[in-house]
Image (cartoon, rainbow, N blue to C red):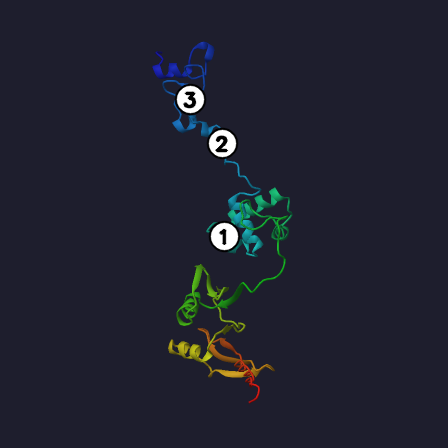
Amino acid sequence: MTMRPHMASSLGDAGGAGKPAGGGHACEGGSEIRPPPALCSPAMAKRGRPPVPDVLTPAEWRVVELVRHGLTTAAIARHIGVSRDAVKAQERAARDKLGLAGRDALRHWDGIRRGSARPRKGDAMDPALGPLGQISRSVERLDRARAFFRDRLGLAELYAFPGLAFLDLGGTRLMLRETGARGPADILYFRVADIGAAHAALAARGVAFTGAPHMIHRHPDGTEEWMAFFADDEGRDLALHMQAAPPAPAPASAPQATSRGS
């Protein structure tokens, strides 16, 4: 039998049976055994993911932060657009790396990802509570609630996600959270400089007030508390609130000086 040229070059000589022609690695030559060029590149010398300069990978951090936020596995999967099994795998990998026994331990783990803007332990920190940063309000339908708070009330919308919208309340965020069902909600009192003007402007936009602005209390120093109630898109109470300070007393007139001998 006559051996075909490509078979001969593949088998090599008797001293190097089984090796490509040339006696070296497949990437070094051979007329027939030629792997894709990418396999011969230095970048392929080490397989697997590149090392991450942090205790967790970015994908693991994303899941860990949502676990610490209190979301369920199903909610995390919906939020980031992956399967539940993928979420479980990332959470399990993070717990294994950190030596944590379960989800509750992970929720209370206080690690900070590398490169975060948050101050790390040991940096100067102020433990005092600051002003109210965010208020959460459940809504039946997010699209309808956004139209009411943004278009009717004139609140600036900061950003929105599936099922969530954030609006600005003079530096405090209002988070609207869609639940798909109507339910009770605490009253939000919007502070205004002129309750009469605010009442008239909102009424002109179609906001339904349950009554006119009215004073509910006068403080010993004469400061008056005024309110006016109106309904949101689900018929729940909201209110305008104004504190009207009494006018400052007129300065006492200085006694007129009299000249001697008058």
Mark 3: amino acid: Cys
Marking on residue 77:
1
Q: Given contact means CB atoms under 8 Å apart, are the residues at marks 2 and 3 in contact?
A: no
Q: Residue at x 47, y 68 (%)?
A: 140
Q: Nearer the viewer, residue 28 or 230?
A: 230
The numbered mark, 1 or 2, whose residue comes first in the sequence reads 2
**Crowding at mark 3 (Cα within 10 Å: few <14, some 14-19, many 20+):** some
Secondary structure of the residue carrying tag 1 is: helix
Q: Nearer the viewer, residue 255 or 239?
A: 255
Q: Residue at x 34, y 14 (%)?
A: 5
Q: Residue at x 48, y 28 (%)?
A: 45
The numbered mark, 2 or 3, whose residue comes first in the sequence reads 3
Secondary structure of the residue carrying tag 3 is: helix
Name the residue beneath numbered marker 2: 47
Name the residue beneath numbered marker 3: 27
Do we see residue 45 in this rendering?
Answer: yes
Work out whether 52 lies above or below 43: below
> What is the C-alpha distance between the residues marked 1 and 2?
29 Å
> Which part of the image, by quadrant, shows the C terminus?
bottom right
- Horizontal and vertical percent position of residue 192: 48, 74
- To which quarter of the image does residue 159 belong? bottom left
**Crowding at mark 1 (Cα within 10 Å: few <14, some 14-19, many 20+):** some
